[in-house]
Amino acid sequence: MKIVTEHVHDASVCVVKVLGDIDMVTTPDVQLAVESAVNRGCVNVVLDLARVTYADSTALGLIVWMDRLLEPKGGRLILAGADRNVARILELSGLIGAAHTVSSASSAAEALVGLGPVEQAGPALWVREFSYPAMPESLAEGRTRVCEAIEPLGMAESALFDVRVAIGEALSNAIRHGSSETGADTVSVSVSAFDDRVVVEVRDQGVGFDGSAVPDQDPYAASGRGVMFMRALMDRVDFAPLAGGGTAVTLVKHR
């Protein structure tokens, strides 16, 4: 087995490329490579599995170990490029989505798009802004207005549905976690269209929600998966505190 580690964008992002089998013999070597990268400042790890043709239960233990290593640092682990057989093993584990830091991508290149700096591809084609009372009754209208704004851009129906779900989760969190219970706060939304992407920002006025809540490990839990859905359905999701209080959640979907 061969392991190649590359830092991309800056020291906080790295790709760990594994060539060969992942089993009880080789897993310690992968752990050593990841730990070394993290010690050098990497907190967002892309584990490139494109050249891995075998993975067993020790690979799942490796993912759990990486999740526990990165979660306290606010980092992410993206499992990239797994072939059909390896992907099936990963899916059987139930870790993708259930573990807060873990997600998947079809390739390392795709994973890096969501981790790198947002490219400035010229000014926005247009910007739409609107706001709502921070009340559950506003959710449906908020989802609808965002989708109506971007529908003329010609994005695929599946992409529009992804945006609808992700924006719904962002609005729900802004109302439930980022606003007072009196309903007096306002949730603001801006939608910006670029040649290569759509950017939606949701801002609340409450105590703030930083997106770090860990989903409930109970598969039958009634809540706790909103951030997981946002990260899975959009190409990039960022949380930032606002100077006057509250949080801005920025969601990016490539066209």
Image: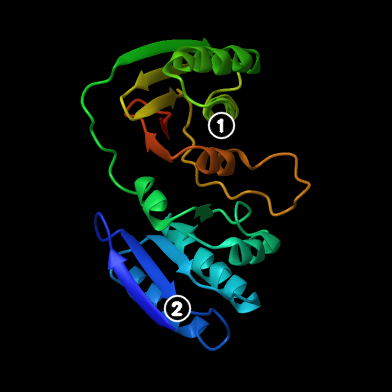
Q: Which of the image's four quarters has the N terminus? A: bottom left
Residue pushed farthest left? 122
Q: Position of residue 76 (x, y in %)?
A: 45, 56
Residue of label 2: 30
Q: Amino acid at mark 2?
A: Val
Q: Position of residue 176 (x, y in %)?
A: 60, 28
Q: Is residue 30 left or right of residue 181?
A: left
Point 43% across, 74% down: residue: 18
Q: Is residue 28 above or below residue 102?
A: below
Point 61% across, 78% down: residue: 58
From the viewer's side, name the closer residue of 190 and 209: 190
From the viewer's side, name the closer residue of 232 and 133: 232
Q: Determine the secondary structure under disc 1.
A: helix
Give me the C-alpha separation between circle 2 and circle 1. Answer: 34 Å
Q: Amino acid at mark 1?
A: Asp
Residue of label 1: 162
From the viewer's side, name the closer residue of 9 and 221: 9
From the viewer's side, name the closer residue of 153 and 231: 153
